[in-house]
Image: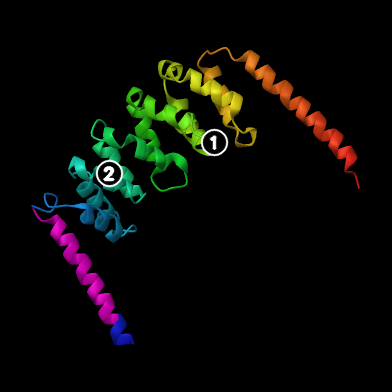
Amino acid sequence: MKVVTRLREYAERYLKEAFWGMLNGLDGVKFMNDDYVLNVLNQVNYSNQEEIDKAVDILSSVSDDLVPNLIVIKSEIAAKAIVRIGYPRVQNVLAELLVWLQDMNWPGSYQIAELFVSIGKPAILYIKEVLTSNDDVWKYWVMEYVISKWSKDLVEELKEELISVMCQSDIFEFTDIIAMRILGQNGVNIRHIFNSKKNGLEEYIERLNELEEIIKD
């Protein structure tokens, strides 16, 4: 059993070294395809900074048609490569990149968020699709890490969608609160909507108090 294990370890190490050696060759990037992109992400040793830097260099040099493959495995390396590739080369995958922000616990999500902050206006259409979706958590992350860092002019273009989020979102996800904060900080008068939501919550709390009296032990 020990011999088999050692042989397997040797084979894996040999294949990995051969793989990286091939990619380090002069024509390594030239002949990259879908499998190579995924292999780089899967083979890299994430505890080895030299390998990480090498992987980012390789992946940020891929042709435009391979850029979508960088989104398949959500990793810090893929995110760094995508950021280095930058806009406008990533313009055809903006919708897919936004999916990365559905969960800010995913590796590389903060780098992707900063990329959208820097892209600005060309991302507006895709951001609107998020704000009109049924995913309140996604809305929250996009508002918190992208929209809140945009200029007043960009926020103005999202005014209608942000007001809709204020009025319709689940209060327990706090998406309405962050939407109000963004609009308020950018000079949009939302006092009447704020008062309406506050009064509604006060009535809700009052009814909860009445219910508490009914279900007392």
Q: Which residue is mark 2?
A: 68
Q: Residue furthest left?
A: 26
Look at the numbered disc 1 and give the secondary structure of its residue: helix
Compared with 151, 21 (above or below) is below
Which residue is drawn at the image coordinates 33% and 49% (left, top)?
72
Q: Main secondary structure of the magenta part?
A: helix
**Badge 2: residue crowd in 10 Å (few <14, some 14–19, many ≥20):** some
Compared with 189, 43 (above or below) is below
Q: Which residue is mark 1?
A: 136
Percent position of residue 209, x then y:
84, 34
Please tell me in which quadrant of the rendered image residue 210 appears: top right
Residue 181 visible? The answer is: no
**Badge 1: residue crowd in 10 Å (few <14, some 14–19, many ≥20):** many
Say whether residue 135 is left or right of residue 1. right
Image quadrant in which the N terminus is located: bottom left
Q: Is residue 27 magenta?
A: no
Q: Report the span colored magenta.
A: 6-26
Please tell me in which quadrant of the rendered image residue 163 appears: top right
Percent position of residue 181, x then y:
56, 23
Mark 2 is on which residue type?
Answer: Pro
Say whether residue 130 is left or right of residue 87. right
Which residue is drawn at the image coordinates 33% and 57% (left, top)?
46
Q: Nearer the viewer, residue 171 or 76?
A: 171
Q: Nearer the viewer, residue 153 or 207?
A: 207
The numbered disc on residue 73 is: none
Q: Earlier in the sequence, mark 1 or mark 2?
A: 2
Compared with 53, 130 (above or below) is above
Disc 1 to disc 2, C-alpha distance: 26 Å
Please tell me in which quadrant of the rendered image residue 3 appears: bottom left
Mark 1 is on which residue type?
Answer: Asp
Which residue is drawn at the image coordinates 42% and 23% (left, top)?
150
